[in-house]
Image (spheres, grey):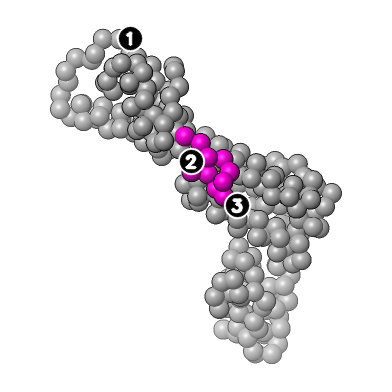
Amino acid sequence: MTKYTGATIEAAIQNGLKSLDTNRNNVEIKVIKTASKGFLGFFKHPAEVEMNVKTSDPAPKRAESQLKVKKEASTAVASPVQTEDRHAKNVEAVSGLIQYLQAITDQMGIEAELSYEMPNNRHVTINFDTPKEGLLIGKHGRTINALQELSNIYLNNMGISYLEVELDTANYRQRRLQILTSLAERTAREVVATGKPVYLDPMPSFERKQIHVTLQDSSEVMTYSAGREPHRSIVVAPR
């Protein structure tokens, strides 16, 4: 197949039809990638499709219901979002995100090798292999958490809103999970002993979630969030 580009998927298809001097019914179309406006000036690219003139004779006329199914299938091929190529779109977006993060860490003076694991189409972990993990993590995890928030914004701008990004280095997330679990259990004991609620320091939503999960089955304390982002925090209170 020959590849054609355009500002949108439809524009790329029209460019291909013009070049092949034919109409849509006579070609096979495969969407390679959707157009991207980029993010903060990085990674802008046009839409790209593959097109090939069909060699077989047109199919005989079928019943109306069959034609409707064929039309819907044809529309799905040209759709920018398809279930069957979601993983490919994720890989493309994550590859661009890694380049973006690499550019940021280079500017920060942090030499790092980035790799990722994507066990499903809902979550991806990007790991930084660097001798400067302390600088990357920052005080109380503020730097790596800020980069993680920026990463999720990047994917949203790429049209990937369903994929959650987690950034990690030197097993920081696992160590932080253990700290949060201990904090939740220690706070619960304090609340039971004093009978008074305890307000924890502000933390990002994914860390607040861990506090909630740790204490959700407790018969003696309950948890809820208070305040507004970015200063939203957990309250552990007696039941």
Q: Which residue is mark 2?
A: 36
The span picked out in magenta is 36-46
Q: Which residue is mark 1?
A: 55
Residue at 58% of width from left, 43% of height from top? Answer: 42
The chief SS type of the magenta part is loop
Badge 2 marks a residue whose secondary structure is: loop
Q: Is residue 213 above or below residue 65?
A: below
Give the CA distance from mark 1 to mark 3. Answer: 45 Å
Q: Nearer the viewer, mark 2 or mark 1?
A: 2
The circle drawn on residue 151 is: 3
N-terminal of the two: label 2 or label 3?
Answer: 2
Three-letter amino acid code of the residue under disc 1: Thr
Three-letter amino acid code of the residue under disc 2: Ser
Q: Quadrant of residue 62?
A: top left
N-terminal of the two: label 1 or label 3?
Answer: 1
Badge 1 marks a residue whose secondary structure is: loop
Q: Nearer the viewer, residue 96 or 232?
A: 96
Q: Is residue 54 above or below residue 185?
A: above
Q: Is residue 182 visible?
A: yes
Q: Quadrant of the N terminus?
A: top left
Three-letter amino acid code of the residue under disc 3: Ser
